Image (cartoon, rainbow, N blue to C red):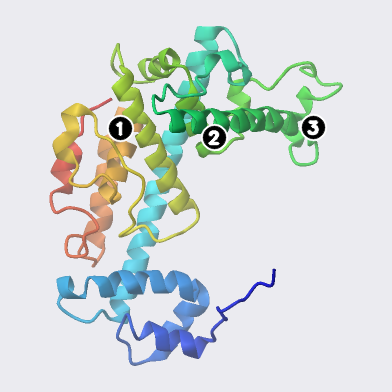
Amino acid sequence: MTETNTLFPINIDSQLKNMHSYVHFTKKARMTAFLTHTGYFRCSRYGKFLISHANDIGTMPTQNMLFQLYDFDTKLRELLFHYCQIAEIQFKTYLADSLSLKLSNATFYLNQQYYTPSRSERNKIKKQSNIRFFKSFFNNLTDYSSHLITNARKFPELKEYRKGGSKATSILPCWVFFSYIELGTIVNIYAYLRGDLRSYVLKYGYSKDYYGKSTTKQFDTWLEALRNLRNICAHHNILVGKTSSIVLPESPDFQALSSNTDLFSRLYALKKILPADKHQELKHNIQSLIKKSKIDIVKLNILPSDWESRFDSITIL
């Protein structure tokens, strides 16, 4: 089959012409430098975001607004990525420590008896889909665990698990393996765990003595939101105005969310997963960033006007 390509690269002059559709500028030197450094596609996402809010800001967006928005978004991503790292590392530790100790099994992640392939789904089609996905997912876990040990060139630091090493006959324990896998894999490991183990992980890491099935399902959405947020930040994609996976609030927190797919819903998920001693630090750093910026987060619908009080109302998990 012959592939027809109807999309062609555009030179800087065409890029400048297109950017005029989004923001007003008279001197093209700064915009040329910005496009050269940032790339047209990335730059245009911010331009489209601004022009979509032209009525809210009451004017045609200017190039200064574009630069200010880009700077704010960059700093917000850097800030949130820092807290995503904290949350990710913390949850990997909770998952590894809680279940390896409870099960007396350092390689529980490779034992199918600790998983529920159907995820207890009642819908026949979804149930079958879950089972098919789990089979592939579990095989990939096994393969990657072996790959880490056998690929001496890429992972020389694991030499103790290879021939001649002190742990040459051992499978990678969870606390080692989890350090090498992506957050998305951790999200799936937790999602497919047996229900009692899912609850135990939360009990081990968080503040309550009991977590029911509803909370573990809500936690799945928080982990997925954390993964979405982390990936946006890590890949330097536009964050403002981005909608993502649905976040389900815990029952005491229903009033905190005005939307379950916006940026604030990501902050909700991040606060739920983060250790309690990081909550106010996160809020303070966002406040400081907003205060220093010339961006109107309310007019641009980046965060709700009462985001601070909403953030405070989120209960500790």
Distance from the alpha carbon under mark 3 to that under mark 1: 38 Å
Vertical side of 244 occupied by 214: above or below: above
Q: Are marks 1 and 2 in contact (CB under 8 Å)?
A: no
Name the residue type under label 3: Thr
Which of discs 1 and 2 lies nearer the camera? The answer is: 2
Q: Answer with the quarter of the image where residue 53 lies.
A: bottom left
Q: Earlier in the sequence, mark 1 or mark 2?
A: 2
In this figure, which residue is indicated by the disc labeled 2? Answer: 185
The residue under label 3 is 150
Query: How far across and down, in percent of the image, does residue 313 sit?
Result: 16, 35
Number of labels in the image equals 3
Query: On the image, which quarter does residue 42 sit in?
Result: bottom left
Instruction: Give coordinates of residue 316: x percent, y percent.
Output: 25, 27
Circle nearer the N terminus (3, 2): 3
Observer able to see residue 30: no
Q: Secondary structure at mark 3?
A: helix
Q: Check the image and name the residue furthest to the front.
A: 124
Element type at marker 1?
A: helix
Q: x%, y% of residue 9?
A: 57, 81
As helix, strand or loop, the secondary structure at mark 2 comes to: helix
Which residue corresponds to the image point at 37% horizontal and 47% vertical from the top-left?
80
Q: Amino acid at mark 2?
A: Thr
**Residue count near mark 1 (Cα–Cα under 10 Å), binned few <14, some 14–19, many ≥20:** many
